[in-house]
């Protein structure tokens, strides 16, 4: 899969929107099920790894 700058930005925005929606619904992030919290943590870790790999390929941040 080719990771471009725009796909990194879009995936970051989707992650931020998801966490934002989780905060505003169901009484906040602390009241969401554990499974959803684990999925957000895994998604955040994958996002960081994608950014590191993009930097290794292009030697640029974004």
Image (cartoon, rainbow, N blue to C red):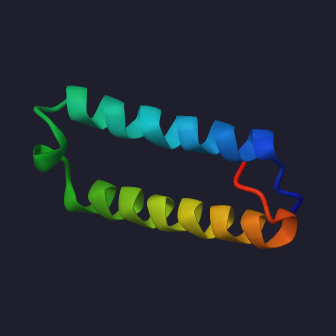
Where is residue 47 shown, x and y percent of the image? 57, 59
Q: Quadrant of residue 2?
A: bottom right
Judging depth in this view, the residue of 59 and 30 nearest the camera is 59
Residue under the point 78% across and 73% down: 56
Judging depth in this view, the residue of 39 and 62 nearest the camera is 62
Residue under the point 49% across and 43% down: 15
Q: Is residue 19 left or right of residue 26?
A: right
Q: Is residue 44 left or right of residue 60?
A: left
Indicate whether 52 appears above or below 33: below
Looking at this rendering, what residue extends furthest in the top direction? Answer: 24
Where is residue 5 shown, x and y percent of the image? 79, 45
Judging depth in this view, the residue of 60 and 43 nearest the camera is 60
Looking at this rendering, what residue extends furthest in the right direction? Answer: 2
Q: Dividing the image into 4 quarters, which one contains the N terminus?
A: bottom right
Where is residue 32 shown, x and y percent of the image? 19, 47
Q: Is residue 32 left or right of residue 35?
A: left
Residue under the point 33% across and 30% down: 21
Indicate whether 10 appears above or below 56: above
Judging depth in this view, the residue of 59 and 33 nearest the camera is 59
Residue under the point 69% across and 47% down: 8
């Amino acid at each position: 899969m080719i990771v471009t700058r725009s796909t990194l930005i879009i995936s970051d925005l989707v992650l931020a929107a998801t966490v934002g929606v989780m905060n505003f619904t169901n009484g906040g992030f602390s009241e969401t099920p554990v499974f959803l919290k684990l999925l957000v943590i895994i998604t955040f870790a994958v996002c960081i790894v994608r950014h590191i790999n993009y930097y290794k390929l292009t030697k640029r941040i974004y």
